[in-house]
Structure formats: structure tokens, C-alpha cells
Image (cartoon, grey):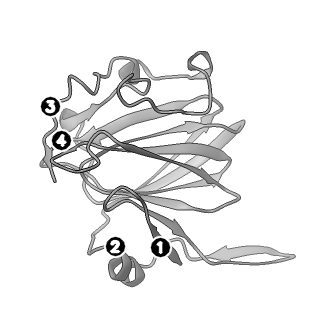
């Protein structure tokens, strides 16, 4: 596996070694020892998976302490644009984001640490998205930021009219109104 640091502290792009032949392929999607050597110690407690159609945008989500979550995300089938936004007060990259294409073809993964809002948009006809989290889901601590926040200025790759949101995601707050519970 190849671990690449990004311009935002603690966010990594992870590219597994893929072994393929005429029968298909094999890859190791996670190895705790290698992860801890290259990133830091972690204890993932849950794996999640979703399937979505083109234009579905899930995010930008985060959980407030004490239920904040780090995520290791990947797209198993299809193609998404995956976004992590630094919401750690005092961070030199506070309010900055990283957008990475994840796909079943490139097999990249993104590690999103605690203190980040996260979301993804499906660019292909459909996509199967999987992620590990290091803390349990707690709906009462769930929060987020509008995907089209003017201060974040994220290029999602589709127009606003092509984006499909849940009722919850339509009502998220702006970055300006965020009172971040995270410190760098």
C-alpha cells in the first residue's frame, strides 16, 4: 500500500497494491499494522456501505464530541468525488478542503481524521461506497455543513441542479455559522 500525505495535515490518500490477471483481481483494502506505521494508531469499530445513483450527494457530515469519527473511505464500484473539509479551529488549513476522485477503477482510499466534515457526490450512473469509522453513530451528535457553501467554494463536478440531497442535507448550516467543537 502506498500512503500519500496531502496538503491538509492528517489526511491521507491510500492506494492499495492490486494484483490482477484474467480471472479478476485481489487487493488488501486494510492492514492495521501498515496503517498505524504510516498514519497513527486507530481502532475502527464499524464498517458501512451505501449504494447511490448519479447525482446523489451525501454530506458534508461530521459528529460532535464525544462521538467524533475518523473515516477510511473508498468507492468499490462506480465513481465519486470525495471531499474532506478541515473544521479544526487553530489549524493552518481551517476551512480548506481536499477533493479526490475515488472509483472502483482507481481503488484509492481517503483517510479523513476526526475534526473534518466529509461528503461525497456520485459521478457515475451508480456507486457503491464503503467506509470504516472509529466511533459509533450517534444521531443526536450528528451535524454538517451545506455542500454548496459559498465560503468553502467546492467544485463538485456537477451543477447544483444535477445534485440530489436528502431532506436532512438540504437543511445543514453554513460554514460561517459553524461553531466548530474541534481544536487543532
- Residues under labels 4 and 1: Cα distance? 27 Å
Q: Is residue 6 above or below residue 42?
A: above
Q: Residue 42: image x %, image y %? A: 27, 70
Secondary structure, mark 3, is: loop
Secondary structure, mark 1, is: strand
Q: Residues within 10 Å of mark 4 (few under 14, many from 20)?
A: some
**Badge 3 is on which residue?**
179
- Residues under labels 4 and 2: Cα distance? 22 Å
**Badge 2 is on which residue?**
39
- The residue that appears at 61% across and 28% down in the rendered structure is 55
Q: Is residue 157 above or below residue 184?
A: above
Mark linked to residue 3 = 1
Q: Residue 4: image x %, image y %? A: 47, 69
Q: Earlier in the sequence, mark 4 or mark 1?
A: 1
Disc 4 and disc 2 in contact, CB within 8 angstroms: no
Q: Earlier in the sequence, mark 1 or mark 3?
A: 1
Q: Quadrant of the C terminus?
A: bottom left
- Residues under labels 3 and 2: Cα distance? 28 Å
Q: Earlier in the sequence, mark 4 or mark 3?
A: 4
Disc 1 and disc 3 in contact, CB within 8 angstroms: no
- Residue that sits furthest to the right in the current view: 22
**Badge 4 is on which residue?**
64
Q: Residue 47: image x %, image y %? A: 41, 58
**Would residue 178 appear left or right of 55 to someone viewing this image?**
left
Tag nearer the camera, 4 or 2:
2
Tag nearer the camera, 4 or 1:
1
**Would residue 85 appear left or right of 13 to someone viewing this image?**
left
- The residue that appears at 30% across and 62% down in the rendered structure is 45
Tag nearer the camera, 4 or 3:
3
Q: Earlier in the sequence, mark 3 or mark 2?
A: 2
Amino acid at each position: 500500500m502506498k500512503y500519500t500525505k496531502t496538503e491538509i495535515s492528517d489526511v491521507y490518500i491510500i492506494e492499495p497494491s492490486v494484483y490482477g490477471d484474467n480471472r479478476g483481481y485481489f487487493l488488501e483494502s486494510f492492514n492495521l499494522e501498515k496503517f498505524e506505521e504510516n498514519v497513527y494508531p486507530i481502532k475502527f469499530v464499524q464498517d458501512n456501505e451505501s449504494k447511490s445513483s448519479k447525482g446523489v450527494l451525501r454530506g458534508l457530515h461530521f459528529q460532535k464530541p464525544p462521538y467524533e469519527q475518523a473515516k477510511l473511505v473508498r468507492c468499490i464500484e462506480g465513481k465519486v468525488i470525495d471531499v474532506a473539509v478541515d473544521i479544526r479551529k487553530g489549524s493552518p488549513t481551517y476551512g480548506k478542503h481536499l477533493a479526490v476522485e475515488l472509483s472502483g477503477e482507481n481503488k484509492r482510499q481517503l483517510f479523513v481524521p476526526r475534526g473534518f466534515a466529509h461528503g461525497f457526490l456520485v459521478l457515475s450512473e451508480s456507486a457503491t461506497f464503503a467506509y470504516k469509522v472509529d466511533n459509533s453513530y450517534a444521531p443526536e451528535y450528528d451535524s454538517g455543513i451545506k455542500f454548496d457553501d459559498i465560503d468553502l467554494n467546492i467544485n463538485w463536478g456537477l451543477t447544483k441542479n444535477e445534485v440530489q440531497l436528502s431532506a436532512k442535507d438540504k437543511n445543514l448550516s453554513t460554514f460561517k455559522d459553524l461553531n466548530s467543537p474541534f481544536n487543532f
